[in-house]
Image (cartoon, rainbow, N blue to C red):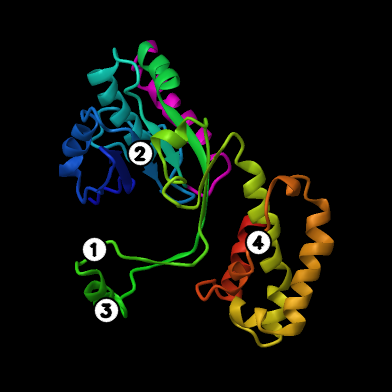
Amino acid sequence: MLFHFFLSFFLYNKHWFIFAPPSVSDFEALLACADNEALRFVVSNTTEAGIVYDASCQFTDAPASSYPGKLTQVLYRRFQKFGKESGKGLIILSCELIEDNGKALRKCVLNYAKQWKLGEEFINWIEAENLFCSTLVDRIVTGYPSAEAETLTAENGYEDAILTTGEIFGFWVIEGPKSLEKEFPAKAAGLPVLVTDNHKPYKQRKVRILNGAHTSFVLGAYLAGQDIVRNCMEDEVICSFMNQTIYDEIIPFFEHLSQLTLFPNFCFYSPYHNGLTLITSDATFHHL
């Protein structure tokens, strides 16, 4: 049985540690991470299907089958160790592509705490000492660059087992208090990470402008013989149609635009964008 615990990044002592146990036998080792006093951040991406409340999960399962169930088990272990101390809760950054991912995860965890009768003190600790942040991640990552791995290893001077390929554009919006920027100084390090009290305008920008622009031209472009977005952007007619859609049909009706900047042009020219048929099927799925 594979142990599909979320691929989590644990940040402590200013270092990232990846913990992805391969089997059920590692569950106790996972729980032991909760005893680490310096543990502060958990980042998860369990896909759209990951944040789900499954009432069949039991506290005695090793581990619970759902991600929120596993997280509840980890949090309870930490509560047992540090529940009497302030400031020992966790900051949980949810990257799943669902609406209000952090709030949805928090709701699931609280449901498990009640279902498993873990006590009002634990529930109060979850609410008072832990921060569940909703986030928006916007970057295409295509996976391990097998064809270039040997060359990149030589250039780096070491072998990177989690090497991956990403598009030039990248943006991570985290809904949380401004104080989070001090604990998680990604922006100060020059990374495209924004902490805000409301991530939704940024999600609307992505869905309406970037995704909306793609969806507007894929059907006609495919019938015109195009296969990928980059080639469409090099076609004067298609590119002109897309720009007209953005500036005449989308932007005038986008209430939050004054707070935001537009996407840079290279978002549409990226060599890593999906093929047109994939964009079409994805848009159809999300609008059914």
Q: Residue beneath label 2, please?
A: 42
Is the stretch drawn in magenta largely helix, strand or loop? helix
Q: Nearer the viewer, mark 1 or mark 3?
A: 3
Q: Position of residue 151 (x, y in %)?
A: 27, 79
Q: Residues within 10 Å of mark 4 (few under 14, many from 20)?
A: some
- Give amino acid for label 2: Val
Numbered range of the magenta stretch: 96-120
> Going by the image, does 278 lie left or right of 223?
left
Q: Which residue is mark 4?
A: 210
The CA distance from mark 1 to mark 2 is 21 Å
- Is 113 contained in the magenta span? yes
Real-space Cα separation, disc 2 to disc 3, in angstroms: 32 Å
Q: Residue at x 25, y 25 (%)?
A: 77
| Quarter location, residue 131 | top left
Point out the tag, 2 or 4, that comes first from the N-terminus.
Answer: 2
Q: Residue 277 shows which numbered tag?
A: none
| Label 2 – label 4 distance at C-alpha | 29 Å
Furthest residue in direction bottom, as rendered: 225
Say which quadrant the C terminus sits in.
bottom right
For disc 1, the marked residue is 161
Q: Secondary structure at mark 2?
A: strand
Residue hosting label 3: 151
Kind of residue indicated by mark 1:
Ala
Q: Which of pointers 1 and 4 lies earlier in the amino acid sequence?
A: 1
Residue 76 visible in the snapshot = yes
Residue 204 image point, x, y percent: 67, 49
* SS type, badge 3: helix
Residue shown at the point (75%, 71%) measured from the top left: 242
Which SS class for mark 1? loop
Three-letter amino acid code of the residue under disc 4: Leu
